[in-house]
Amino acid sequence: MSLAADRAYERIRAGILSGEFAPASRLREEELVRVCGVSRTPVREALGRLAAEDYVIVTRNQGAQVKTWSDADMADLFELRALLEGHAAARAAQFIDSAGLQLLKGNVQEMEAVFRSPASNEQKTETFLRLNGQLHEAIWKAAGSERLENLLGRLIEQALVVRTAHQFTMDRIAQSHQHHRDLVEAMANRDPLWAEAVMRGHIRAALVFVRQHANATSP
Amino acid sequence: MSLAADRAYERIRAGILSGEFAPASRLREEELVRVCGVSRTPVREALGRLAAEDYVIVTRNQGAQVKTWSDADMADLFELRALLEGHAAARAAQFIDSAGLQLLKGNVQEMEAVFRSPASNEQKTETFLRLNGQLHEAIWKAAGSERLENLLGRLIEQALVVRTAHQFTMDRIAQSHQHHRDLVEAMANRDPLWAEAVMRGHIRAALVFVRQHANATSP
DNA sequence: GCGCTCGATATTGTATGCAATTTGATCTCG
DNA sequence: CGAGATCAAATTGCATACAATATCGAGCGC
């Protein structure tokens, strides 16, 4: 919202996403004052917003701590994503105009180019994730429901907490890329059921990937 | 969260739901200080929460105003409700235990009793709405997804802003009651698809009712 | 009369001080 | 030695003062 509060919000959120503030660690207001360079009032406002977005948990008189994510939480989150993003995809397939469709096609072509380019895998991953985010957001917008768009924005941001911890393989990117091409084809054919089915599968695959990686690294 | 902030939150929310604070009216902090009996700090915290829950809109340096609901917003909201509550019903049909099922059956029997009682229509409506809320919440809980439960809680509370403005007819209550009985029957048969279908229909019927009433009263 | 600028007033944003509560280290007693 | 009581330090909750910004009407030029 306001300048100082925004600054605190961005700074704390970045700290959580980067791992600077570890899951389950307590966030003391005075410490955040030092880190953010603003007073306690905007820090508290930022913590309130972060709590509303499920980044932190605030307990009365006991301050804030970074939220931890159990496997069940993850499954929950991705099931909701599959439901809501599937719905968004179906609506988008119905309502998208030719300009929006061109946008999606262009996005997929960019991905294609990146995928075939001689860049390093790390660079490819970075670019791919950016384009991926843009594609999904374009689909939410095309669905034409502001409320749905907001809801998805929040849920996906939550999933980011986990995502950034993972290294993507080229196989995984290729799979995801194919899903995107299918999605755009479904939209071009104005086929809501197809679009929804593809999107649901896309999200389920993402969950499985996250899970496999979690199992591989946790012990 | 904290005591004073909670008090402010409840008071302002009640004011919005009761119509004391009209849609689109501006909420000045000093005025809320007088009304709530706490200082500006907890008032601002309460406004932040209300903004996160879509009761109000806060613009930087321009304060808060009560959110207005267009027809498109309503349609949006109910479509999301249908999707999410349908999903919750399906999950509940899969996972509910016999104790939970007994709870639902008891609730429906209570409704039956109220429906046949000699109370005034107004009393019946009041009791019915309370039992209706309990039934829906029980179903969300039975779905076993905390995130889904939270999401639905917020969405339904938003729908309440509109609901309280309407007078229910006995026909409408009878229709709704039949839906509830179908729902419980579907759950008793562990039929997720049936439960989901009934719930979706239930929500769509609610939207149509709200719309009809809105059209009847707006001019 | 109409639109614009300007400034007094009202309102929101931020910092800070004090009160209330929690924390956790130390001491006591079984 | 361990469980519980106790109290100082740390931390959060609330109120208030001050700074920054927006609002809105009066005055001015056209």
Image (spheres, coloured by chain):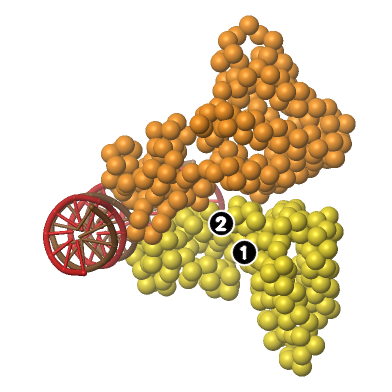
Chain colours: A orange, B yellow, C red, D brown
The disc labelled 2 sits on which kind of residue?
A: Glu
Task: Tell me if residue D29 comes above or below residue A187 in the rendering.
Answer: below
**Distance of label 2 from label 1 (alpha carbons):** 9 Å
Q: Which residue is mark 1?
A: B157
Query: Which labelled disc corresponds to residue B53?
Result: 2
The disc labelled 1 sits on which kind of residue?
A: Glu
Query: Counting residues from the N terminus, which is met first, the one under dot 2 or under dot 1?
Result: 2
Give me the chain letter of mark 1. Answer: B
Query: Which labelled disc corresponds to residue A180?
Result: none
Give the image location of residue A159, x and y in percent: 58, 38
Q: Quadrant of residue A12?
A: top left
Give me the chain letter of mark 2. Answer: B
Give the residue drawn at x 51%, y 32%: A218
Which residue in the rendered view is the most extreme toward the top?
A118
Can residue B165 be spotted in the picture?
no
At label 1, counting other C-alpha atoms closer than 10 Å, the crowd grade (few under 14, some 14-19, many 20 or more) is some
Is there CB contact under 8 Å for labels 2 and 1? yes
Give the residue drawn at x 66%, y 71%: B134
Q: Quadrant of residue B214?
A: bottom right
